[in-house]
C-alpha cells in the first residue's frame, strides 16, 4: 500500500467545500501521479476552480485532507503551497500591470542582500528558464504593454522561478491564439517529461485528448470518475461531463440573407496605445438572417470595432447605419434600442458585479412598463422574468435570482448575459466571444440559440477567437489584421489553414505575402 502512495505526488481525499447556498465540492477525491498531465473536466460551476483553489491554499475545505508524497499537509495560504512546490496559473492572471515582466516574476520570492534586491541574479535565472523552455519574453517590458499570451508566459515563468514541481493551469487556453495554444501544449509535455506533475483545468476536449494522460470529471460538485485518455473519446467525456449525449457539431440550414441591418462604411477608430488607427477604413454589411464573423488574432482591432459600433469608443471617420438610421453619433442608449451586445469583458461591460442576478437581468429594460410603474420597480415582475431566464438558460447560482453576480462562476455569469441579450429581440446581435469559458453543453445550447435567432431574421455579428466556432457557426467570415479587413471567406469552401494565413497577415484579399 505504501508503494502505491509513493506513485501519487498529490492526493486530495474526500474534499468538501461549501459556499452560501451551494456545495461547490462534495466529497471529491483526486490523485495526481508524479510526471503526469492530469486534466480536470467539468461544466461551468462544477467545482473545478474551487478544488484547485483549495489545493493552492486560497480556500480552506470543510472536510477532507491533502497529502503530498503520502504525508498529510496543511495548506493555509498560497505561501504554504509554494513552500510545498505547488504553483498555479490562474484563469484571470495575477500580475501587477505597472511592474516590468522581471519584477512580476520575482515578486514575493525576491533575492536580497543587505536589504537590496539582487536583480542581476534574478535576471540570469529567468533568462536561463526562458531559454530552456522556449518562453521568450521581454523582461524589461511593463505587463500592461504586452499581449495576453505573453502575460501567460510570465505566469508560467513565475512558477518555474519558484522551482515548483506541481503546476496547476486553470483554463490556460481561454485567451490564447491557436498558435499560442500549440506552444503551451508542447511546453506542458516538456514539463511532464522532466518529472513535473501538471493539473490542467479545461473545457476543451480537443486539448485534453491531445495532452492529458488521465482525466477526472466533476459534475455539479460531485466526482464522476477518472479515465485514461487513451481509453476514451470526446463523445464519452462530454457525456460524463454533462450527463447526456452532446452534439459537438453545429447543425444549421444555409442562410437566407435579407435586407442590410448593419452597414459600416470607411470606419476608422483611433488607437489609445499606438499612433496608427486601431480600426482603419473598415467597410462591411451584416444582413438579416445571417451570421457574419469577424475573425482574427486577439489585438487586431476587433475589440475597438465593437466598441465603436456599441458607442463605447468614438470614431474619427466613417459612417455606421443601423436599420436605416445613421447612428455614427448616437448615444449608447439610442444604439441599444436596435442592438443587443454580448460584450467581450463580462466583468467590465457585461454585469454590475455587486448587483443581484435579477437586477442584472433587467439592466437595459427596467424602464419598460412591464418592470416599472410611475418610476417604481415592480419587484415581482423582475423576479418572475429573471426566474424564467435562469430556467431557460440553466444559469446556476447558490441563491437563484437574489445571488450577487460577483459570487457566480465565470461561465454562469456569461450565461446570464447571453440570456439577457438574446431575450431582448433586437434586429442586430453583436456577440463577442459568446462561448468564452463555457463548457460543451452550454456551447451547444448557445450555438443553437444563435442559429435560431438567425433563422428568425436577426443579423448576427460574431467576434470569435475560436477557430472551430468561426468555421462551424459563420455564414460569412471577415478577417481582421492590424485594424483592417484583409479577407472575406466562405466557411464552406475555405480551410482552417487558409484562415490562419489571413489571420497572420500572410494573405490579403487574394494577394499572398502582403503585410506578412
Image (cartoon, rainbow, N blue to C red):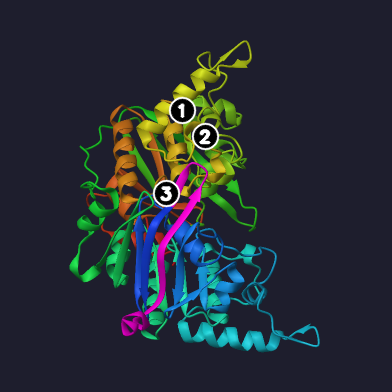
Quick one: which residue is furthest to the right in this view? Answer: 114
Residue 360 in the image: state x and y as whole percent.
Answer: 54, 33
Q: How many marks?
A: 3
Above or below, comparing residue 134 to residue 490 in the picture: below
Q: In this view of the protein, which residue sits in the foreground, 56 or 295?
A: 56
Residue 132 in the image: state x and y as whole percent.
Answer: 48, 87
Q: Main secondary structure of the magenta part?
A: strand
For marks 2 and 1, give the CA distance. Answer: 8 Å
Q: In this view of the protein, which residue sits in the foreground, 136 or 235?
A: 235
Q: Provide the residue designation for mark 1.
A: 386
Magenta segment boundaries in residue numbering: 1-24
For marks 3 and 1, give the CA distance. Answer: 19 Å
Q: Which comes before the other along the chain, label 3 or label 2?
A: 3
- Left or right of 512 in this view: 313: right
Question: Which structural element holds mark 2?
Answer: helix
Residue at 53% x, 47% y: name it: 345
Above or below, comparing residue 424 to residue 133 in the picture: above
Residue 162 in the image: state x and y as whole percent.
Answer: 57, 80
Q: Provide the residue designation for mark 3.
A: 45
Label number found at residue 357: 2
Amino acid at each position: 500500500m505504501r508503494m502505491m502512495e509513493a506513485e501519487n505526488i498529490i492526493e486530495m481525499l474526500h474534499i468538501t467545500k461549501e459556499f452560501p447556498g451551494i456545495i461547490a465540492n462534495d466529497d471529491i477525491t483526486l490523485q495526481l501521479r508524479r510526471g503526469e498531465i492530469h486534466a480536470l473536466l467539468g461544466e461551468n460551476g462544477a467545482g473545478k476552480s474551487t478544488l484547485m483553489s483549495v489545493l493552492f491554499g486560497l480556500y480552506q475545505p470543510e472536510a477532507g485532507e491533502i497529502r503530498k508524497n503520502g504525508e498529510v499537509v496543511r495548506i493555509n495560504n498560497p505561501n504554504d503551497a509554494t513552500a510545498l512546490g505547488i504553483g498555479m496559473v490562474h484563469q484571470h492572471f495575477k500580475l501587477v500591470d505597472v511592474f516590468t515582466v522581471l519584477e512580476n516574476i520575482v515578486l514575493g520570492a525576491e533575492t536580497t542582500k543587505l536589504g537590496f534586491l539582487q536583480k542581476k541574479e534574478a535576471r540570469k535565472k529567468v533568462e536561463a528558464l526562458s531559454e530552456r523552455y522556449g518562453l521568450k519574453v521581454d523582461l524589461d517590458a511593463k505587463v500592461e504593454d504586452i499581449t495576453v499570451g505573453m502575460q501567460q508566459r510570465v505566469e508560467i515563468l513565475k512558477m518555474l522561478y519558484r522551482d515548483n514541481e506541481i503546476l496547476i493551469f486553470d483554463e490556460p487556453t481561454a485567451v490564447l491564439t491557436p498558435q499560442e495554444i500549440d506552444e503551451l501544449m508542447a511546453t506542458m509535455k516538456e514539463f511532464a517529461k522532466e518529472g513535473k506533475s501538471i493539473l490542467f483545468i479545461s473545457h476543451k476536449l480537443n486539448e485534453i485528448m491531445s495532452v492529458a494522460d488521465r482525466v477526472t470529471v466533476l459534475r455539479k460538485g460531485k466526482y464522476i470518475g477518472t479515465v485514461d485518455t487513451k481509453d476514451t473519446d470526446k463523445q464519452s467525456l462530454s457525456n460524463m461531463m454533462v450527463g447526456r449525449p452532446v452534439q459537438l457539431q453545429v447543425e444549421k440550414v444555409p442562410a437566407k440573407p435579407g435586407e442590410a441591418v448593419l452597414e459600416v462604411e470607411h470606419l476608422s477608430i483611433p488607437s489609445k496605445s499606438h499612433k496608427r488607427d486601431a480600426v482603419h477604413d473598415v467597410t462591411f454589411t451584416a444582413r438579416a438572417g445571417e451570421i457574419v464573423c469577424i475573425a482574427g488574432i486577439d489585438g487586431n482591432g476587433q475589440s475597438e470595432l465593437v466598441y465603436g459600433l456599441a458607442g463605447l469608443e468614438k470614431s474619427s471617420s466613417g459612417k455606421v447605419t443601423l436599420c436605416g438610421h445613421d447612428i455614427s453619433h448616437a448615444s449608447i442608449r439610442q444604439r441599444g434600442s436596435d442592438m443587443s451586445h454580448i460584450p467581450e469583458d463580462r466583468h467590465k461591460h457585461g454585469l454590475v458585479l455587486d448587483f443581484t442576478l435579477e437586477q442584472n437581468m433587467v439592466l437595459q429594460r427596467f424602464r419598460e412598463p412591464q418592470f416599472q410603474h410611475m418610476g417604481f420597480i415592480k419587484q415581482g415582475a423582475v423576479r418572475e422574468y429573471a426566474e424564467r431566464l435562469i430556467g431557460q438558460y440553466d444559469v446556476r447560482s447558490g441563491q437563484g435570482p437574489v445571488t450577487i453576480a460577483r459570487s457566480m462562476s465565470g461561465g454562469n455569469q456569461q450565461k446570464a448575459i447571453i440570456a439577457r441579450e438574446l431575450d431582448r429581440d433586437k434586429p442586430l446581435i453583436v456577440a463577442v466571444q459568446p462561448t468564452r469559458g463555457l463548457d460543451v453543453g452550454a456551447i451547444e445550447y448557445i450555438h443553437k440559440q444563435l442559429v435560431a435567432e438567425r433563422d428568425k431574421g436577426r443579423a448576427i455579428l460574431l467576434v470569435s477567437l475560436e477557430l472551430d466556432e468561426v468555421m462551424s457557426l459563420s455564414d460569412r467570415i471577415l478577417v481582421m489584421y492590424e485594424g483592417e479587413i484583409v479577407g472575406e471567406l466562405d466557411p464552406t469552401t475555405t480551410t482552417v489553414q487558409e484562415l490562419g494565413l489571413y489571420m497572420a497577415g500572410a494573405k490579403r484579399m487574394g494577394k499572398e505575402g502582403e503585410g506578412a
